[in-house]
Amino acid sequence: MGEREAGSLKVVGSKPTGSRNKGMKMVKAGIAILLLVCASPQTKKEARSSEEKRVQEAYEPSKEAKASYIRALSYYQQGKFEDALTYYKEAYEKDPNFIDAAVGMGNCYIALRKFEEAEKVFSALVKKHPEDPRGYEGLGFLYGFCKKGYQKGRLYYLKALEKKPEDMGIIFNLATLSENYDKKEADSLYKVILSKNPNHAGTIKKYLIFLVKEKNFKEALRYAYKAESLFTNDTEVRTKLIEVFYNAKEYTRALEHANFVISRFPNIASLYIERGDIYSALKKYSNALSDYNMALKIEPDNALALLRKADLLVRIGRAYEGINSAKKAINIGFSDVQLKAFAYSIVGDGYKKIAESLSKNSDRDSAIKTYKTAITWYKKTKSLGRTAYYSYADGNVKVCEERIRKLLGIRP
């Protein structure tokens, strides 16, 4: 009645199967957090109470209850939760031992955001069937994902795992929940699932997204190639693959994914900025500028697009244009101090480039004046504190000062 596998975040739905002892071994070998499940070891004979035996056997509901359940499931899948709830209730009334029907009721209440009613259903399941993990799963989902009570949700999921340690679906939900309060735990849990099923598509996708979010591109690269073959039409995954391959300096692969995502979403400025960065890395500067300009056509006040464009213009010798683009971004303003530091550094770089050109043309006084202007902007960068550009700006202040001394004929 709806076997649930890891990799798809769901409320509840699987039937418990498999060996508890074998599962315990997997948990112990997997991650330290799940040792909580093993705190009170029992013999196989002690652990398998008559209730647990009954739960682990395939339960066959009455025909009448099953008919109502199937009708409820159809409504649920259509998103008609009120109708689904009616028939889940009917199925459960016809067969009070039909756990899947009770689970369906709880899921409907969650979908309808009637959390108190959902809690009553799952709490009643825990009381009536204490060896079945599904009641604990429901409470874990309710508290963890719906009420944002992460630690309480975690405890219920751990209780579910105590009943069925090998359930990858429970571990997946716990891993997803862990992203909110313990990144290391989430990472370990995803690895547990992939150690048991290295090719599980849903978990590969979720773990890849998690790793990119955490900027762990080196680890993400391990799963990127497999994700490429599994999710050829998944724009969410392919958007993440742009970042992974760009940071791995596999620019041609990154470009392929950027082209695909832009073909699906041609009006998103950030995508053109990403592709512009790729073209810039590939030294296809005209293509990069074209993409930055496209981003600005979509969002004229996009500060990042202005700065990327400014930085590239300065680097390819169009310093005045670069300075103007960076100053336009500065006038728009920044909520992020790192972007402001980047902007000031670009303006400093622009004036430094101009000063170098003036120096080569033997225009000493103009060169000295322009180097001093560059120093002013680099000092503005430093005034923002220990940003990612502090050391860069500090180094350039020293370079500019040294060049001024040289132009003035002052020996070290």
Image (cartoon, rainbow, N blue to C red):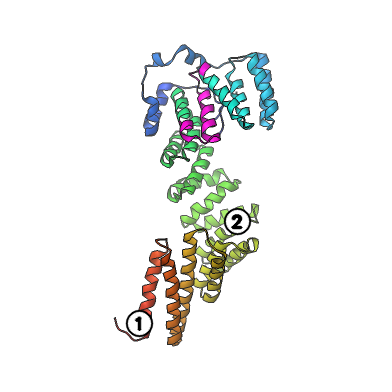
- Range covered by the magenta-colored residues: 127-154
| Position of residue 268 measured from the top left corner of the image (x, y, whole percent) | 62, 56
Mark 1 residue type: Arg
Tell me the chief SS of the magenta region: helix
> Is the residue 15 above or below the residue 54 in the image?
below
Q: How many marks?
A: 2
| Position of residue 33 measured from the top left corner of the image (x, y, whole percent) | 39, 33
Residue at the outermost left position:
412
For the C terminus, which image quadrant? bottom left
For the N terminus, which image quadrant? top right
Mark 2, secondary structure of its residue: helix
Q: Is residue 132 magenta?
A: yes
> Gap in Å between the C-alphas at discs 1 and 2?
49 Å
Mark 2 residue type: Asn
**In the picture provided, is 334 more to the left or to the right than 406?**
right
The residue indicated by pointer 1 is 405
The residue indicated by pointer 2 is 259
Q: Quadrant of residue 14?
A: top right
> Is the residue 221 above or below the residue 287 in the image?
above
Q: Nearer the viewer, residue 132 or 198?
A: 132
- Which of pointers 1 and 2 indicates the residue nearer the eye? 1
The 10 Å Cα crowd at callout 1, few under 14, some 14 to 19, many 20 or more, is few
| Position of residue 101 measured from the top left corner of the image (x, y, whole percent) | 61, 21
At x 57%, y 23%, the residue is 120
Residue 284 visible to the viewer: no
Q: Nearer the viewer, residue 386 or 34?
A: 386
**In the picture provided, is 84 more to the left or to the right than 100?**
right
| Position of residue 302 measured from the top left corner of the image (x, y, whole percent) | 59, 61
Please tell me which of labels 1 and 2 falls first in the chain: 2
> Is the residue 292 above or below the residue 133 in the image?
below
Residue 401 visible to the viewer: yes
> Is the residue 309 above or below the residue 104 in the image?
below
